[in-house]
Image (cartoon, rainbow, N blue to C red):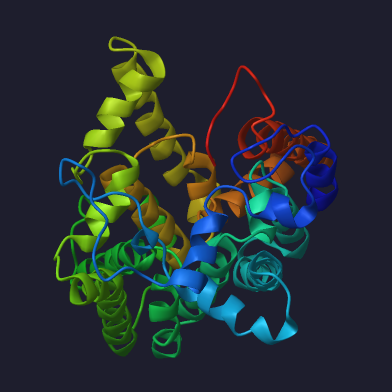
Amino acid sequence: LTLLLARLGAQDTPATPWAGPRPSWGEHTSFWDAGWYARIESEGYPAELPLDASGRVTQSTWAFMPLLATLAGLLSWTGASFYTRAALVSLTSSALAAVLADRWLSPRTGASTSLWAVALVWSGPCALVLQGAYAEPLALALVASVLLLADRRRFLAAVPLVPLAALSRPVGLPLAAGLGLWWLADLLRSRGAPPAVVRGPLAAALGAGLSAAQRARLLVLTAVALASALLWPALAWAVTGRADAYTATETAWRGSHLLPFTPWVLRSGWWAGEHLGPVLLAGVLVLVGAVLGSRALRSTGAAAWTWCAGYVLYLLVFFDPTTSLLRLLLPLLPVGWALADALGRHHGRRGLALALVCCVLGQVLWISWVWDLASVSVQWVP
C-alpha cells in the first residue's frame, strides 16, 4: 500500500534537488538523507571534518551510523544500485521488526490486538522510510530484538545485539536510559523502598520483579548499552582527532551547539510564537505524561514501558523538535500496541479500522507535503 501511494505521489512530484519531475522508483528512493548513506559507501568518512569560513563544523557523513551502508555493501555482488540494495535491507529489516514486535508484545495484548498494532504502526504517516534507504527499519528490528530478549529475562543473550543497534541509529543512549531505569526501580523495590519512591505507572509496569541474578544481568546489559552509545563518538574522535566530532557534525544541521533541553524551548517559539510557545511546550509535556501514565502502556510490561520512558527522555534532552519528529517517534513501538489495546477495548474493531484509515491518510499527506515537496504552501523535511 505504501509503495502504491509513493508511486502515485511520484506522478505529481516536481523537480527536486535529487531528481527531475515524476521520478522513477530508484530516484524516489534517493531523496533526502538517503544520499548520505550512499556517500558512506562511495566515499567513507572524512579524516578531517569539513569547516565553513568561520571554522564551524559543517554537515558530513559522520552524522550517520555505518550499519545500513555496510549491509547494503554486502549485496554489491548483485550489481544493483546502492538505493536498491539499501531498500532491500530496509524491507527485510522492517518485516523482521514487525514479526519481532508482535512476538514481544502479543502476550501482553493478545494476538488480534497485536496484529492491529502492527497494521497501525506500519501504516503510519512516515511508513515510506521503512522501505527506503533509511536506517530506521534496522534500528527497529534490533531494538525489538533486544527488548524481546530482555522481556523474556534473557539479558545476556541481548548483549551482542546492542552494539549493532547503536551502529544503526543513535539508540544506545535511550536503551541505556530505559534499561537503567528498569534496573534502578527494581533494585529500590527489592530493598523495600517506600511507595512514594516506586509507585504509579512504574510500579504497575514492573510486574512481578526480578531475582537478584536477573537484576545483575540487567545491569550488565545496561552497561553494554551505555558503552555502545559512546562507541560511534569515540570512533569519530579517533579518526578525526576531535573529541566532539560526532556531536559537532550532528548539530551542524541545527546550526548550534548541543545544549540539553534548550532546542525544545527555542523550537516551541518557532512553532507557535514567543508567547504561545511555552503553552505549546507545556501541552506536549502533559501529553507525554498522559501517554506514559496510561494503563494500556503500563500493561505492555517493564521492558516496553521503561524503553518508552528512556526514549522520550532522550528526545527531550537531545532532540531538536523539527518536522522530523514523526519519523523519530517510530521507535516508540509499544505506544502503537497501547493505542490498539485502548481502541479495541473502548471502540472495538470499528475504532481500530477508523484509526487505520487515519494512518493511511497521514501517509498521503506526509508523502506529498514532506517527502515529495509537492505542496507549494507546506515544505517540511522528513
Q: Position of residue 142 (x, y in %)?
A: 52, 74
Above-or-below relation of 129 to 347:
below
Q: Quadrant of residue 275?
A: top left
Above-or-below relation of 35 to 275:
below
Q: Residue at x 69, y 87 (%)?
A: 77
Q: Position of residue 167 (x, y in %)?
A: 41, 73
The residue closer to the viewer here, 191 or 42, is 42
The residue closer to the viewer here, 201 or 48, is 48
Give the number of marks: 0
Above-or-below relation of 214 to 136:
below
The residue closer to the viewer here, 324 or 238, is 238
The residue closer to the viewer here, 165 or 158, is 165
Q: Residue at x 64, y 37 (%)?
A: 16
Q: Is residue 22 left or right of residue 240?
A: right
Q: Position of residue 191 (x, y in %)?
A: 18, 72
Give the residue at the far front of this rendering. 53
Q: Can residue 134 be seen from the camera position used here?
A: yes
Q: Can residue 121 be seen from the camera position used here?
A: no
Q: Residue at x 23, y 67 (%)?
A: 184
Q: Is residue 321 left or right of residue 132?
A: left
**Placement of the C terminus among the 4 image quadrants:** top right
